[in-house]
Amino acid sequence: MAFDIDMIKKVYAGMDDKVKAARSLLNRPLTLTEKILYSHLADDFPSKPYERGKDYVNFSPDRVAMQDATAQMALLQFMQAGKDKVAVPSTVHADHLIQAKIGAEDDLKTAQVTNKEVYDFLSSVCNKYGLGFWKPGAGIIHQVVLENYAFPGGMMIGTDSHTPNAGGLGMIAIGVGGADAVDVMAGMPWELKFPKLIGVKLTGKLNGWTAPKDIILKVAGLLTVKGGTGYILEYFGEGARSLSATGKGTIGNMGAEIGATTSTFGYDEAMERYLRATNRDDVADAANQIKELLTGDPETYEHPEKYFDQVIEINLSELEPHINGPFTPDRATPISKMREEAQKNGWPTKVEVGLIGSCTNSSYEDISRAASIAKQALEKGLKVKSEFTVTPGSEQVRYTIERDGFIDLFEKIGGKVFANACGPCIGMWARENADKQEKNTIVHSFNRNFAKRADGNPNTHAFVASPEVVTAIAISGELGFNPLTDTLINDKGEEVKLDPPTGFELPPKGFDVKENGYQEPAKDGSKVEVVVKPDSERLQLLTPFEPWDGKNIMGAKLLIKAEGKCTTDHISMAGPWLRYRGHLDNISNNLLIGAVNAFNHETNNVKNQLTGEYGKVPDVQRAYKAKGIPTVVVGDHNYGEGSSREHAAMEPRHLGVKVILVKSFARIHETNLKKQGMLALTFQNENDYDKILEDDTFNFIDLEQFSPNKPVTIEVVHADGSKDIIKALHSYNEQQIAWYKAGSALNLIAQKNA
Ligand code: F3S
């Protein structure tokens, strides 16, 4: 990975000056987060400190990582930017599309057939444009990134919410939408609201049954699923230093469950050990030379209340293992209270399946601790009462744990090993009888446990715990089982007790792997052909959107006036539609099907003004498109909240909607609309929303003078011929107006590269 160490050395070389400049700008000691953020600014150094939670700042991330579901559209877009190569080191990981059913080998073979065209596309596009491609079976994005790419003090974006897993190696790693990845790969800056900071001081030391997972389960209970929104969590203290890098990764990973922007830890010996164990002596040596830049200034940890917006303190010596759930990861129950809680709430206490692994908890340490429980079970005459599955996070981990006999132990107690992929964690689990929707309980070491997430059954009560606790519970078969105090009856009818788990932070014999599944891109990609079948259902090459003709939009029809919540899920639904993530025309058949029509209060039923009949939103829109008639979507407050899914902006654009006019936008969606060359407007007077009627036609009569801060005048013509003149505001700056004129931000980049 010479490519990486050169990049890392470059980042480190500039860091000292930038940190000094930031310290003098802020005129105080700096937290680690501030050091990393201020040393990754894309623009000139500011003349005054950025205001946390307020200022939008342009950053230059060092890396991009993408998983296969989100990479498809991101790369299809990137192909339009007219670049020969990605601007920063980037990787794609084939992990989300493998269904867990029979076991690793068979499931991988099936995935290679069913997803062949997607894999061929990703492999060829990576090869052409200089991205590393981790083939199906190579592992889960976050584990592979931690093993190969994460580095202390770095900044990374990834098209997956659990990208903050790389915080385990002291990175600022943030989950984003595909459009952001495209920007960074195309060499554009990436914008983020300067985050607020929560300091988490860890004192004491984990012991017995308690694991790093329990720290984040506890934090989730304290902060709830919304409590981290807009914040970066920075962990520090002797307790933090006592955790392995992978344990820190688990904590960073699940920071997503409290809505945190990301989580991070200062560089320490555990990180150094992990870097060396994963063949990165060069990175460890480079980090050792600038150690003090890779952690917060001591004063910020001594008096955290002065430097963080919020401070939490947890004593690891007293922390009890937790089990969180069901249905939400912040419902935290200490293990000693679970039996009582389950009874009180009527949760099924028989555990059907225990699942360990996933991107969150499949390190060597996790697996070795769980294996120590399996070993005891064998020695003490116990087997699993529940089904038990193991999902390794990478081929390197899988190969090493097989070599060290752990897989054998799991199989001997009745466990089954799935492919190194997301599988049950993302609902890619062909669980038998899940369609019967019976009430049941599963316990896993994954991160999310919302209804239906694992198996599609809304009545599956999914609980989250550490791998060692999940293993113990699977052996007992009972949700309320507390291995700290309870005993079990073995095959001889004797009463036995499990001892606390033991394990290894890192493999004593080192990591090993035969075929890691990595595809290095071609040195010269110019001759590489990108493979997309013209009749493919799942992939479609994009055609650049038309540039603006410079004229007013006249005679636009109302497609839908949406009332109430209209999130990106309402605009572009997930579920079965995920299949079409790489095919803009096919996925556009879900356009706004979840939005509620303000006139009949129904979803996916709007009036076609050309025929007077009602139809599905995408069908009606296609009818307008066929006649070349522009359309307008009207919406309520916070239109487009939810995710940064770019499909929600691309679909209306593709189908010929010209304007989205709402009371207010969720900011990311507004930006996505601008990037795709749409006109995103807000009512100057919110009450004008009420003036919009079902048969309205819109004329944007001064759009020809489109310029920053100048409201747009709209003539709303009603069916009876009467008119309302209303004003709409916009937030386009010069640059964004240039996107609009070019037809999209990518068109503009491509023009510049031509
Ligand atoms: Fe995959 Fe689940 Fe992690 S979907 S990336 S294993 S959170």
Image: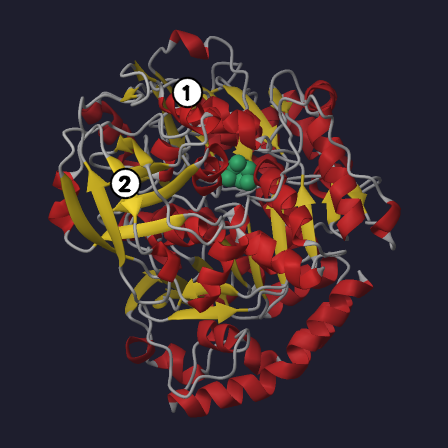
Mark 2 or 1, closer to the camera: 2
In-front residue for pair 136/446: 136
Separation of residues labelled 2 and 1 (CA atoms): 21 Å
Mark 1 burial class by Cα count in 10 Å: few <14, some 14-19, many 20+: some
Mark 1 = which residue? Answer: 619
Ranked by sequence position, the earlier of labels 2 and 1 is: 1
**Ligand 1 within 8 A of label 1's CB?**
no
* Residue 310 left/right relative to 165: left
User: What percent of the width, then of the height, locates residue 245?
Assistant: 58, 58
Is residue 615 depicted above or below 158 in this figure? above
* Residue 432 badge: none
Mark 2 = which residue? Answer: 698
Q: Amino acid at mark 2?
A: Phe
Instruction: Give me the residue at 43% from left, 77% from top.
Output: 31
User: What percent of the width, then of the height, locates residue 704?
Assistant: 38, 57
Q: Secondary structure under badge 1?
A: helix
In-front residue for pair 123/411: 123
Q: Secondary structure under badge 2?
A: strand
Residue 376 visible? The answer is yes
> Quadrant location of the N terminus?
bottom right
Is residue 418 depicted above or below 232 in this figure? above
Mark 2 burial class by Cα count in 10 Å: few <14, some 14-19, many 20+: many
